[in-house]
């Protein structure tokens, strides 16, 4: 036997040495899950911060994303990758676990958001210029489909309100043409396009309900909204909330509301009214207005805390330094505070104990406890706008 080592012992020792080296390596120390990660868009610099919500810290910054003046993002189904849609037409794939750009294409001249398919394999981008939607392979960013938004008269339109829907579908609106289109990719890479013309004037944004059933487009050119039941699209588009501003003096619109920030809370839906200092309260069983809440200014986002107990609202200029909190059971404003000028976005953590708020003109993101309303912390950021957490990966329409 002497000093010889058996093959089994030698293999075991080598494995232990390798394991010890791995545990001691920086990479092992950096391993983390993706569930509490997110990004903060720094619109002035073409950069995003990668953040985590457990300890509320910045982990890294990623440069080189182009014009982020109206940027939004979606996440891969494993929550590892953020797909960032820039105003310069850039589609950028960011690895948030190993923070860096892993892919980037300039796919248009002026983009206005995007969506990721139900199976996570397709990423769609909505374009003002050229008007239409382009769809890409989420892994390689290779072009899968180009859908020009051309109406029956041959006029090309800006596209808005792009969302994902069950059945491997994307739904979007044509701003200039007043139409809603469904692009169905369930049969492969060549989509089946279904068009719904004559929905109303100037659809400016849209939402899809969290069950993926109803697609609702706001109409800038008319008092009302257009609704499409995606379970029964053959029934066509229905007008809802028609004339909600009838008989009232129209106010100048300082910033269009973002319908993707709609709030489903309790038994009702809360929608920002265009140009008005009001939230509309809607009964989703019949899509009729059942009330209104007077608020501080023209609402931009009305966002429900995940448990539906509260709705948090921010506002357009000149009241964009303020946030109001509505208690859903009483439908009363229970808290108001002013973090600073140009509050652009509010994002709740998945279970709603924190809300992250971007304050562009003060150069920071503030984090609040949603029960006590106490400020927990703040993070410096260069002209922050959108805040997007990886939990969005598992929600329809976000």
Image (cartoon, grey):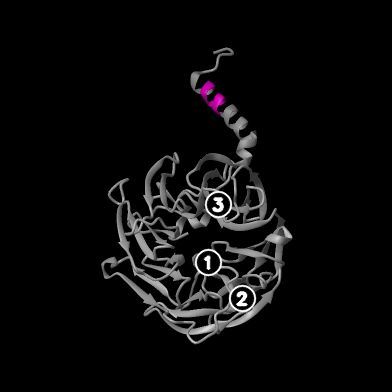
Residue 87 got which mark?
3
Front residue of 354/207: it is: 207
154 relative position to 383: left or right: left
Q: Nearer the viewer, mark 3 or mark 2?
A: 3
Q: Residues within 10 Å of mark 1 (few under 14, many from 20)?
A: many
Provide residue 75's location: percent of width, then percent of height.
49, 51
Front residue of 140/37: it is: 140
**Span highlighted in magenta in the image:** 10-15
Q: Residues within 10 Å of mark 2 (few under 14, many from 20)?
A: many
Q: Earlier in the sequence, mark 2 or mark 1?
A: 1
Q: Please check the rendered image and state whether residue 11 is part of the magenta-colored stretch, yes or no.
A: yes
| Residue depicted at 40% across the width and 52% down the height | 117
Q: Please check the rendered image and state whether residue 190 is part of the magenta-colored stretch, yes or no.
A: no
| Residue depicted at 41% across the width and 61% down the height | 174
| Residue depicted at 45% across the width and 41% down the height | 141
Q: Quadrant of residue 164?
A: bottom left
Front residue of 10/25: it is: 25
The residue sitting at the left extreme is 234
Residue occupied by mark 1: 258
Q: Earlier in the sequence, mark 3 or mark 2?
A: 3
Q: In which quarter of the image is residue 373?
A: bottom right
Q: Nearer the viewer, mark 3 or mark 1?
A: 3
Provide residue 303's location: percent of width, then percent of height.
54, 69
**Alpha carbons under labels 2 and 1: distance apart:** 17 Å
């Amino acid at each position: 036997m002497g000093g010889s080592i058996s093959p089994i012992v030698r293999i075991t020792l080598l494995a232990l040495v390798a394991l010890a080296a791995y545990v001691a390596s920086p990479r092992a120390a950096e391993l983390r899950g993706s569930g509490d990660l997110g990004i903060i868009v720094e619109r002035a610099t073409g950069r995003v911060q990668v953040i985590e919500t457990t300890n509320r810290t910045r982990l890294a910054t990623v440069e080189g994303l182009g014009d982020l003046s109206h940027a939004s993002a979606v996440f891969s189904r494993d929550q590892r990758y953020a797909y960032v849609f820039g105003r310069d037409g850039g589609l950028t794939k960011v690895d948030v676990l190993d923070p860096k750009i892993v892919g980037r294409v300039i796919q248009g001249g002026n983009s206005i958001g995007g969506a990721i398919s139900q199976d996570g394999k397709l990423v769609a981008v909505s374009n003002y210029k050229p008007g239409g939607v382009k769809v890409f392979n989420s892994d390689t960013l290779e072009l899968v489909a180009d859908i020009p938004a051309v109406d029956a008269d041959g006029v090309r339109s800006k596209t808005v309100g792009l969302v994902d829907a069950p059945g491997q579908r994307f739904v979007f609106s044509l701003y200039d043409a007043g139409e809603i289109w469904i692009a169905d990719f369930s049969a492969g890479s060549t989509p089946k396009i279904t068009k719904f013309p004559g929905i109303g004037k100037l659809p400016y944004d849209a939402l899809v309900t969290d069950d993926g059933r109803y697609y609702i487009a706001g109409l800038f050119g008319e008092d009302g909204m257009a609704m499409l039941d995606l379970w029964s699209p053959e029934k066509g588009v229905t007008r809802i909330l028609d004339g909600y501003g009838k008989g009232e003096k129209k106010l100048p619109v300082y910033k269009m509301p973002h319908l993707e920030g709609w709030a489903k809370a309790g038994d009702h839906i809360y929608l920002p009214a265009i140009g008005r200092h009001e939230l509309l309260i809607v009964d989703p069983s019949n899509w009729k207005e059942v009330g209104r809440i007077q608020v501080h200014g023209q609402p931009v986002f009305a966002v429900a805390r995940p448990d539906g107990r509260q709705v948090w609202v921010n506002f357009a200029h000149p009241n964009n330094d303020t946030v109001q909190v509505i208690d859903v059971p009483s439908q009363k404003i229970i808290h108001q505070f002013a973090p600073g000028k140009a509050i652009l976005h509010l994002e709740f953590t998945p279970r709603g104990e924190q809300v992250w708020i971007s304050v562009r003109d003060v150069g920071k993101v503030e984090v609040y406890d949603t029960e006590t309303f106490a400020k927990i912390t703040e993070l410096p950021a260069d002209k922050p706008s959108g805040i997007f957490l990886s939990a969005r990966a598992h929600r329809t329409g976000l």
